[in-house]
């Protein structure tokens, strides 16, 4: 039996896993990402973990798949990230091939997450799946009949950068009114911090849940789940725009299922209940749909499982 290595490089955490040829997870090593330490530190950590896993198995390891938390040039197998300092134009696929001596395939974390949920998670059995990751930003991936849809410029699935509003809120891409600028964890965090400047007495619980530090998106979601009115307002507004974005996706490609992943999606019922309310508000009585909207079955591990699927494609 042959194995593959899977690597998931995120802005907060990184994971390295060993998977069998059926895409089943055998072992995982993981840690916290030190963004300030740059690519050199990260590559050193990944190299060590990969060698540990290689030494732990007697079965041949035939390939490696890599998920990177940022923009990737799939054609040239390099990172094009403008979000993480030091990674821009780095040929990460080539680095892994030279380091491990096996074929490697690299893609962004949203595409990897889509593959992971399609093969091993909430999208099993779907003909057309759309995966939306909602964390600091918003990304997406489309899988049709088992294959990722990347598009002419590898831009398919950039759902976070669909303009959904005339808002002047600037997005990380430089545009304004994008879904990411209105519905991401980063957007909720920014809105809560704005409340803290104007109405500090309204955000006391969010500050408390953030450990007395700057308010985090996680604290906003936790406070909203507890019934905090200010937090609930922030979450509702974010979900209102997310519902518009998801309805746009449904009307363009009409997928079997939309899988929501990322840290914000782990709030579960809070997220889904708000979304469904606004989807009903935006709905048309003459254009009905049966697309399911669910949260990721694999949680934070969706991109890692997808990285394994990328590796199996070239094994």
Image (cartoon, rainbow, N blue to C red):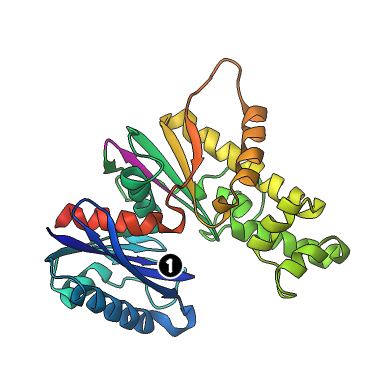
Q: Using the image as rendered, state which of residue 237 and residue 298 is in the foreground.
A: 298
- In the rendered view of the protein, which quadrant contains the C terminus? bottom left
Q: Foreground: 296 or 137?
A: 296
Give the residue at x 32% y 51%: 154
What residue did someone put label 1 on?
Answer: 10
Q: Residue at x 48, y 82 (%)?
A: 36
Q: Is residue 226 magenta?
A: no
Q: Is residue 67 left or right of residue 51?
A: right
* Front-most of residues 263 and 188: 263
Locate residue 230: give its quadrant: bottom right
Snapshot quadrant of residue 272: top right
**Direction from residue 118 to residue 103 in the image, left or right:** left
Q: Which region shows up in magenta? A: 140-145
Above/below status of 108 relative to 249 = below
Instruction: Relative to 124, say whether 206 is above or below.
Output: below
Q: Considering the numbered disc 1 on the image, is that residue within a helix, a strand or a loop?
A: loop
- The location of residue 20, given as percent across then percent down, is 21, 57
Q: Work out whether 64 lies above or below 128.
A: below
The answer to if 141 sits in the magenta stretch is yes
Magenta stretch secondary structure, dominant = strand
Does the image show residue 150? no
The N terminus lies in quadrant:
bottom left
Q: State left or right for residue 113 relative to residue 159.
A: left
Q: Position of residue 283 (x, y in %)?
A: 61, 25
Is 147 displayed left or right of 33 in the figure?
left
């Amino acid at each position: 039996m042959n194995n593959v290595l899977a690597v998931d490089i995120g802005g907060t955490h990184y994971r390295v896993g060993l998977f069998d040829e059926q895409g089943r997870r055998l072992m995982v090593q993981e840690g916290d990402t030190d963004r300030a330490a740059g690519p050199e530190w990260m590559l050193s950590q990944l190299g060590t973990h990969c060698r540990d896993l290689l030494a732990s198995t007697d079965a041949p390891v035939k390939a490696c798949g890599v998920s990177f938390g940022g923009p990737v040039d799939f054609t040239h197998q390099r990172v094009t990230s403008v979000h993480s300092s030091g990674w821009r134009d780095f040929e990460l696929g080539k680095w892994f091939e030279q380091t491990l001596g096996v074929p490697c395939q690299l893609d962004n974390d949203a595409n990897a997450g889509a593959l992971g949920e399609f093969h091993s998670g909430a999208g099993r059995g779907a003909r057309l799946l759309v995966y939306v990751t909602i964390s600091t930003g918003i990304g997406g991936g489309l899988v049709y009949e088992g294959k990722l849809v990347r598009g002419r410029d590898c831009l398919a699935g950039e759902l976070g950068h669909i303009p959904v509003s005339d808002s002047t809120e600037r997005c990380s891409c430089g545009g304004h009114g994008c879904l990411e600028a209105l519905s991401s964890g980063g957007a909720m965090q920014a809105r809560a911090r704005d409340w803290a400047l104007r109405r500090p007495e309204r955000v006391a619980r969010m500050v408390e849940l953030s450990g007395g530090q700057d308010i985090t998106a996680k604290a906003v979601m936790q406070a909203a789940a507890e019934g905090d009115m200010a937090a609930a307002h922030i979450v509702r507004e974010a979900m209102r725009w997310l519902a518009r974005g998801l309805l746009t996706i449904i009307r363009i490609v009409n997928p079997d299922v939309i899988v929501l992943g990322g840290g914000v999606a782990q709030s579960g019922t809070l997220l889904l209940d708000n979304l469904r309310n606004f989807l009903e508000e935006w709905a048309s009585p003459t254009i009905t749909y049966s697309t399911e909207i669910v949260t990721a079955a694999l949680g934070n591990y969706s991109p890692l499982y997808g990285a394994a699927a990328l590796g199996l494609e070239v094994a």
